[in-house]
Amino acid sequence: MANYRFFIDYLIHKFSAKTRHGVHSPFVYKLVDEVIYDFSTKPYEEEIERKRQALKKDTRIITVTDYGAGSMMNNGKQKAVGLIAKNALKPKRVAQLIARLANRFAPVTIIELGTCLGITTAYLAKANPNASITTVEGCPETAAVARQTLDELGASQVQLKIGNFDIILPQLIQEQEKIDFLFLDGNHRKEATLNYFYHCLPKVHEQTVLIFDDIYWSDGMKEAWREIKNHPQVTLTIDLFFIGLVFFKKGQEKEHFKISY
Ligand SMILES: C[S@@+](CC[C@H](N)C(=O)[O-])C[C@H]1O[C@@H](n2cnc3c(N)ncnc32)[C@H](O)[C@@H]1O
């Protein structure tokens, strides 16, 4: 049933979303034209995708600790790294877009919630070599594989914190002067997603970009996305179906875009 609803939502999005041509906001038009639809190959992509393929064939078995929405099913389960690489990572197309977005906004600091095996983290690091990047993963054994991935890909500068987002995020936010770029990819529950959003708000600024993953994953996630869009501090959102972008630019009317990707 949930899969059927997701498919219907996908079709609705596909037919209602715009391309760059239907967009009147100059900021969004430029972002769509120059970043979202920039499919040119970047120098760091090939190496990371090679590592993804190697991880898919990785037969090591690890014990999964899951604090996320799938925790009842997954906790303490033994899983092959290869299976995690096949099922849990952002696909190439989305990971590369997130890297391009981070490159475009040149954030001083980047936070990723949900490292998993470190593939999207590696994209963020390679596309933004000067940014200070912190990624958070709840499962120690998954995080150990991610650390290897990042070191092998020459992204040792990434700080990898192990623990529940519920505990680590408030500490992280307290330590940071401001939040420039945050990608939330884990714990797809309505309450948790909204909690993380509200934790961020005191430190967002005009250039902040928040990215929420899987905004159509469940009724709860759709409700969370609606509440985020309607929040008075949010001035612009871009719904790309698989991810949603949130901006806090001042001096513009509140606008929400659905863009085909
Ligand atoms: C979908 S995967 C992340 C994929 C990764 N961003 C990528 O594309 O390469 C989500 C990860 O978040 C972690 N996670 C989920 N909920 C969490 C929580 N509450 N605290 C810490 N980690 C959590 C899971 O252990 C899992 O590894």
Image (spheres, grey):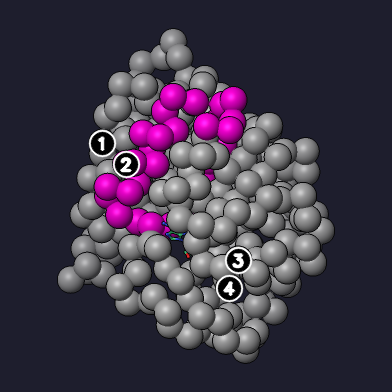
Mark 4, secondary structure of its residue:
helix
Percent coordinates x, y for residue 205 in the rendering? 51, 21
Marks 1 & 3, CB-CB < 8 Å contact: no
The type of residue carrying mark 2 is Leu
Please tell me the numbered disc located at residue 194: 2
Q: Which residues are magenta?
A: 174-203
> Rounded to the nearest whole Å, what is the CA distance between mark 3 and mark 4?
5 Å
Q: Residue at x 32, y 35 (%)?
A: 228
> Rounded to the nearest whole Å, what is the CA distance between mark 1 and mark 2?
8 Å
Marks 3 & 2, CB-CB < 8 Å contact: no
- Pick the front one: 166 or 124: 166
Marks 3 & 4, CB-CB < 8 Å contact: yes
Q: Is residue 133 magenta?
A: no
Q: Does the rendering let one see residue 22?
A: no
Q: Kindly identify which residue carries mark 4.
A: 141
Q: Kindly identify which residue carries mark 1.
A: 227
Q: Does the rendering let one see residue 137?
A: yes
Q: Residues within 10 Å of mark 4 (few under 14, many from 20)?
A: some
Nearest-to-viewer mark from 4 and 2: 4
Q: Kindly identify which residue carries mark 3.
A: 143
Mark 1, secondary structure of its residue:
helix
Q: Please report whichever mark, 1 or 4, sits nearer to the chain's N-terminal start.
A: 4
Q: Residue furthest left?
A: 1
The type of residue carrying mark 3 is Ala
For label 2, being within 8 Å of ligand 1 is answered no
Marks 1 & 2, CB-CB < 8 Å contact: yes
Mark 3, secondary structure of its residue:
helix
> Rounded to the nearest whole Å, what is the CA distance between mark 1 and mark 4?
34 Å
Q: Residue at x 47, y 20 (%)?
A: 249
Q: How many marks?
A: 4
Percent coordinates x, y for residue 19 in the rendering? 45, 41
Left or right of 24, for residue 155: right
